[in-house]
Amino acid sequence: MIIVVVYMAASVGLGSWIGRKQTNTTDYFLGGRDIPWQAVTFSIVATETSVLTFIGIPAISYLGNITFLQIVFGYMIGRLLVALIMIPAYSEGKIETAYHFLGNRFGQKMRSIASITFMGTRLLADGVRLFATAIPLTIIIKGSGFLGGLTDGQFYALSIVFIGILTMVYTYIGGIRSVIWMDVIQMSVYIGGALLAVLLILNRLPGGFDGVIEWAADENKLRWLYFGTDLSLREFIKAPYTLFTAVIAGSIFSLASHGTDQLIIQRVLTCRDKRSSQLAITSSGIVIFFQFLIFLLLGAMLYAYYEGLSPEQLGLTRADEIFPKFIVEEMPVGISGLIVAALFAAAMSTLSSSLSSLSSATVLDIYKPLFGKDKSETELLSISRKVTLGWGVILISTAIGFIGLKGTVVEVALGIASYTYGGLLGVFLIGIIDKKTKQIDAIIGFVTALIVMTVVIATLKIAWPLYTVVGATTVIVVGLMSSKFGFGSESKTNKMTE
């Protein structure tokens, strides 16, 4: 616990120091548009990693195999599309947020709707992520015998509040510059921690690496390619990790998540120019592939270590507790402290990014254009910090609400994001490819997509990557039909403005 406390205290102190010189909202939310693309690359990866990757991805391969890796190929294709389609659009005019583009293209109403949708989605998805962070911390506290009279739910709540408050401090002070550079440091820590865990498992298993590979192959754990030809049509559309669904739907999901989500676009906009932004987003795809591979193989190694026992047989309530169990029970005290610190590195990078993106969307998309046009930069900076604190409290409360969540947390979080990603992507795409579409057409398409997604999720069981495909297709079809047949009568210039 000492190592963990020291690490978290150092993170708060260093993060606050890095971003101590903030004078306006451009510094606070965009890092002065002067962050090196290499740092942005690692920040993107660290932001999307979170504790879900650290504990959720090993759980997926522990329970199944590594076919999840197929979807990573889709992620890589999607990022290339972001670089080719989305980033050039963001480079026209001094765009401050992802939804600023929609304001320029359609109008403030569409910008506000998209931004509020992002806030709701990000709040729910990152509420799950923050809850996931509490899983290993709870196991550690319970294992130490500290606060032994608390229930599991109380342990989770205490852990969530502890992590949330610490992360709020340096995000409040340092803004996005602090967040990005801390992401770089924290990614180094959690990747190092994962590799250290791999080495320790290999050292403890008879036969070492060759023995693990042989065991995993015999148990079908190394299967990474799955076409799904043995499935019926109904089964096929439910399966998230067939080659078609993973690559095609995964690429569209990534186009949405990395092309329309303020969490990622905020980082892209901190780069010095368009080329730097494109390099950052495409290179992050390469890094994320190797990162997922490490964590999937880690899950297969844990399966070999525990000789194929189910989570229930190991005395666990959920598969996501398998890696934390190994850390706490099987690792030497000093090393387990380093691994747990790595867990918190992943958690704090994602949480700080979420707070920064939520506050930037609130201030720049809603408050500033509607209520703060006459405010000075000093006043806006002060408001931005207060909004950051407010979102921190809301996010902590949301995470506590997810206590008792069933299923692997990684799939729950991705499913939440998929619900609205399709609609947002569809609006962006019709704004880019069809210059005749008006604001009312985009709004009609977007609202229709949300209704369709509600019906689809409630009545049809389909793989979560397909949600984005359905949502985006609905917006494009309905929006273009509205434009062609004149369902809307609003006129809005299509010219990009400063």
Image: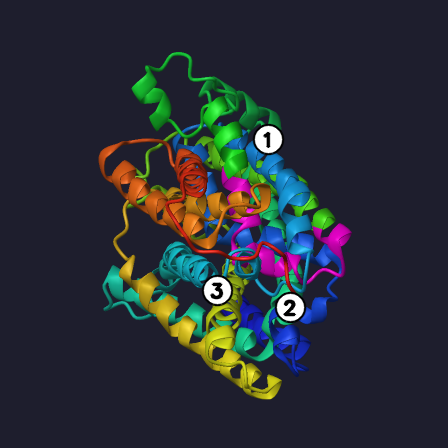
Give the quadrant of residue 315.
top left
- Number of marks present in the image shown: 3
Give the distance between the C-alpha atoms of the residues marked 1 and 2, in whole angstroms: 47 Å
* 353 versus 284 height, above or below: below
Density class for disc 3 (Cα within 10 Å; few <14, some 14-19, many ≥20) is: many
| x, y percent for residue 323 | 44, 46
Give the distance between the C-alpha atoms of the residues marked 3 and 1, in whole angstroms: 60 Å
The residue to which callout 1 is attached is 208
* Sequence-earlier tag: 3 or 2: 2
Of residues 216 and 117, which is closer to you in this image? 117
* Sequence-earlier tag: 3 or 1: 3
- The answer to whether residue 410 is left or right of residue 216 is left
In which quadrant of the rendered image does the C terminus lie?
bottom right
Tag 3 and tag 2, C-beta contact below 8 Å: no
> Which residue is painted at 71% across and 48% down in the image?
278
The span shown in magenta is 253-277
Of residues 478 and 222, which is closer to you in this image? 478
Say which amino acid is labelled 2. Answer: Leu
Density class for disc 2 (Cα within 10 Å; few <14, some 14-19, many ≥20) is: many
Task: Please tell me the numbered disc located at residue 108.
Answer: 3
Residue 276 belongs to magenta span: yes
| x, y percent for residue 80 | 65, 39
